[in-house]
Image (cartoon, helix red, strand yellow):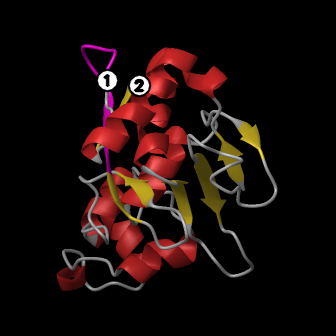
Amino acid sequence: MPYVISRYDVGPKFAARAIAHFKETGEPLMEYQRKRYKIVLGIESSFTSCGYALTDPTVEAEPSLTWRELAERAGCDVEDYAAEFNLEDDELDDVIPGEYFQERNMGIPVDGRAVAFDVVNGRIPGSWQYETPTDEEAPLGYVEVFNGPMVGSDYTAIEVSSEIALACLQRYLDREKAGIKIEP
């Protein structure tokens, strides 16, 4: 579901500067408006037709928790936890396979895109459009939200169409005082 970014979402002067800067340098115009940010996100290549996906670079592809750590995090008695999952004492310090978290939807992010989705979703600027817009319809680009886009898919991500859209999203997040910094 794409959200078309308009110059009114980021200010007409910024929109003009962002376009001019990109044409001149080929880079997004990242004018950070805040001194401190609570959350720093990166970008990576998109799996879809969009240009980039936001990601949390500190999250590993698979969690590296052991059964013991998971029990402690959940506030459970480790021995009771081992009995519930039929674990031997020597298995408690084994790393839990990533599939375990995905199958049980444990609320523990399995990738950086999911973290970025949780942080940015609900703060997306622009007007919703059913179809992917053309360059003429969205000269500043668009932001697309993926939340299990098809049956059987657990793909969650916030993707942006271009470097200009990336700069506009950062500008919008700063204007909304979201405390989120995107570093290309």
Which label lies toward us, 2 or 1? 2
Q: Residue at x 28, y 57 (%)?
A: 59
Amino acid, disc 1: Glu
Q: Is residue 37 magenta?
A: yes
Q: Which residue is mark 2?
A: 17
Q: Position of residue 142 (x, y in %)?
A: 60, 47
Q: Nearer the viewer, residue 77 or 132?
A: 132
Q: Position of residue 93 (x, y in %)?
A: 18, 74
Q: Is residue 30 magenta?
A: no
Q: Marks 1 and 2: in contact by CB < 8 Å?
A: yes
Q: What secondary structure is the stretch in magenta mostly built from?
A: loop
User: Looking at the picture, does residue 98 appear above or below residue 86?
Assistant: above
Q: Position of residue 149 (x, y in %)?
A: 69, 69
Q: Nearer the viewer, residue 115 or 28?
A: 28
Q: Considering the image in quadrants, where does the N terminus appear?
A: bottom right
Secondary structure, mark 1, is: loop
Amino acid, disc 2: Arg
Looking at the rendering, the stretch of residues picked out in magenta corresponds to: 32-42
Q: Residue at x 32, y 26 (%)?
A: 38
Label 2 – label 1 distance at C-alpha: 10 Å
